């Protein structure tokens, strides 16, 4: 049986930048038996996160180049990308009316909820939502998703 994970930006950045939870995320992504789903929106957010670290000086230009290269490769080979479509927009609007979320967080959660429903309707186990934001995790739990916070995993 394949385990499916949805990663938001706060979780996935740990695969490329060493911070709390990085070892756990790296070990998880190394699992060949798992599927990792990300939103199309995440592409922009990840490049923004890498650039912020470059501007702040916490990574070098060489580090930045390696991170972007590794991320681009993983997008092609390791991650399944959910496109930002009408069903996601509709679900995000609903989530914003039900939970105290930021707009991009609502898009991530909507992507996960729509994919989770798709899996369950196909008689497959649902997905686990990975995120390092407690408010977003609370909303994901309220929507019936299993969750993990990489910052709390050993």
Image: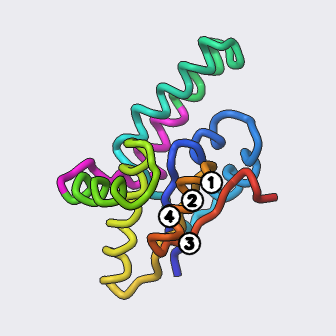
The answer for how far apart the CA atoms under marks 4 and 3 are is 8 Å
User: 47 above or below 14?
Assistant: above
Location of residue 95 in the rendering, given as x and y in whole percent from the top left corner: 36, 59
Q: Is residue 36 magenta?
A: no
The mark closer to the camera, 3 or 2, is 2
Q: Residue at x 55, y 34 (%)?
A: 70
What numbered label is drawn on residue 152?
none
The mark closer to the camera, 1 or 3, is 1
Q: Is residue 113 left or right of residue 133?
A: left
Q: Is residue 78 left or right of residue 107?
A: right
Q: Quadrant of the C terminus?
A: bottom right
What numbered label is drawn on residue 140?
4
Upstream in the sequence, badge 4 or badge 1? 1
Asked whether the beta carbons under mark 3 and mark 2 sit within 8 Å of each other, the answer is no
Q: Which residue is mark 1?
A: 134
The residue segment tinted magenta is 70-86
Crowding near the residue tagged with mark 2, few <14, some 14–19, many ≥20 C-alpha atoms within 10 Å: many
Q: Which residue is mark 2?
A: 137
Asked whether the beta carbons under mark 4 and mark 3 sit within 8 Å of each other, the answer is no
What numbered label is drawn on residue 146?
3
The answer for how far apart the CA atoms under marks 2 and 4 are is 5 Å
Crowding near the residue tagged with mark 1, few <14, some 14–19, many ≥20 C-alpha atoms within 10 Å: few
Q: Residue at x 40, y 44 (%)?
A: 76
């Amino acid at each position: 049986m394949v385990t499916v994970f949805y990663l938001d930006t706060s979780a996935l950045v740990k695969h490329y930048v060493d911070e709390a939870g990085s070892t756990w995320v790296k070990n998880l992504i190394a699992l060949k038996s798992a599927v990792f789903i990300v939103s199309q929106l995440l592409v922009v957010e990840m490049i923004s996160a890498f650039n912020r670290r470059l501007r702040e000086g916490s990574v070098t230009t060489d580090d930045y180049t390696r991170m972007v290269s590794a991320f681009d490769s993983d997008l092609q080979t390791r991650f399944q990308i959910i496109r930002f479509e009408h069903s996601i927009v509709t679900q995000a609007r609903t989530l914003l009316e039900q939970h105290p979320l930021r707009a991009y967080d609502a898009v991530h959660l909507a992507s996960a909820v729509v994919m989770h429903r798709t899996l369950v309707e196909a008689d497959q186990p649902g997905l686990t939502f990975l995120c390092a934001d407690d408010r977003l995790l609370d909303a994901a739990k309220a929507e019936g998703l299993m969750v993990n916070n990489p910052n709390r995993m050993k």
